[in-house]
Image (cartoon, grey):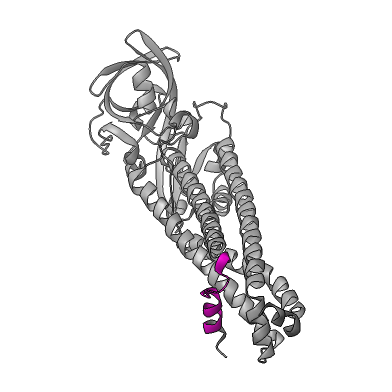
Amino acid sequence: MNLFVLAKTLLKSEVDNYSKPIIKISVAGVALGVTLMLLALFVTAGYKMVIRDKMVSMGAHIRISSVEQNYSFNLLPFDRNLPFVDELSKNPHVKNMQFYATQVGILKAQNQVEGFVLKGIDSTFSWKLFGKHLVAGNPLHIIHGDSLNNKIVISKTLASKLQLKLGDKVGAYFIQEPPRQRSFVIEGIYQTDLPEVDNRFVLTDLRHVQKLNDWDSSQVCGIELLIDNYDKLDAIGQLVHSEIPYTLKAETIKQLYPHIFDWLALSDTNAIVLLVITIFVCIITMVSIFFIIVLEQTKNIGILKTLGLNHKKLVQLFLIIASRLILRGLFWGNITGIGIGVLQMTLHLIPLDPVTYFVSFIPIVIHPLTLLWVNLLVFSVCLLTLLLPAYFISNRISPVEAMRYI
């Protein structure tokens, strides 16, 4: 006796078919639960990736700086040609090394003043990562040996506060001994939607900061490392820290901005809670419809047992029926979840307030592994939950009692 054909026949039976609308509602419930789970995971992964990439684009994965810093952006310099630099450049996990220096100052324009951090960069800076945040103008083209120019890339936040636009000149004042003043021209405007970045940083040629601090061309206050695998960030960070002199320290992006990454970790907890609740609802839905189908098909089950269908085969029949219903829900849930995710990825239909969420729309990342384990989790948990009721009912239904319904 082919149990798969029999299960299909029982689900399509036209006798006492009052349960068919209930079955459709139950399948829709499972599909809705799967859709919610997929979207929750897509959004969580997308949000974490976008925020992480924004932080990395300005600060890289690992930052090397002096241990004896004064907890400000005026860090102590060190020589960029120290022996450990060559060793790090040979590390296969290090994709890029970029040198920088910072100096705190005040911008003045249109009778407005704003504090800022002037970050000097050179040709090693990764515009491939940061360039996607440019909303106007061009990146800085810094080539070793070229003459020094006064171009800067400023954030949209600072530009709006100072009422500046591309090509405008802005005065910068630095509280030093003696105080110094520089005049810059806006070459580009960026926007990351991260207050830690947009409210502070202005990019310029590294040589400007070196001259302001009376440093020579080999002195920098930090090295930023881009690595090839974020999942190995902590291990690589420890390795880098062990290879540098004791006067320097290596900090990962998570150590530099713990409040942001702790907040991102909290989103994982929220997603897990939603997954548990949704799976619980799917289980209740499947158990309920399972008992309804059994009640409707009691007569047919009694006939099958009379014809010789044993206990083991009956349990298998129940599980095949349940599997068909679960797979229907998974199919429509995947179609709906992936469809909504793709639409949001391409059209950005649902916007967000960047002031609150640091992004202007809900980010989506669809991973094949996420699809795989969500489907396996829902299918296996629901099926295992139905195993006990199927075993119990197959023992309880008596052919003699069931024949009364004929």
Q: Main secondary structure of the magenta part?
A: helix
Q: Residue 305 lies in what quarter of the image?
A: bottom right
In the picture provided, is 73 more to the left or to the right than 149? right
**Image check: 398 left or right of 258?**
right
For this view, does 19 lie left or right of residue 352? right
Residue 246 visible in image: no
Front one among 233 and 182: 233
Q: Nearer the viewer, residue 76 or 194?
A: 194
Horizontal and vertical percent position of residue 185: 26, 22
Pick the quarter of the image with the N terminus: bottom right
Where residue 259 sits in the image (x, y, percent)? 59, 36
Q: Which residue in the rendered view is the most extreme toward the top?
A: 111
Q: In which quarter of the image is the C terminus?
A: bottom right
- The verdict on residue 12 being magenta is yes
Viewer-side residue, 390 vs 199: 390
Question: 136 and 78: which one is in front?
Answer: 136
**Residue name at image x 64 percent, y 66 percent:** 292
The correct choice, above or below, for 339 with respect to 379 in the image is above
Start and end of the magenta stretch?
5-19
- Rendering coords of residue 325 (x, y %): 54, 68
The vertical placement of 143 against 229, above or below, is above
Q: Which residue is drawn at 25% across and 34% down?
A: 138
Q: Is residue 242 magenta?
A: no
Q: Quadrant of residue 156?
A: top left
* Residue 262 in the figure: left or right of residue 338: right
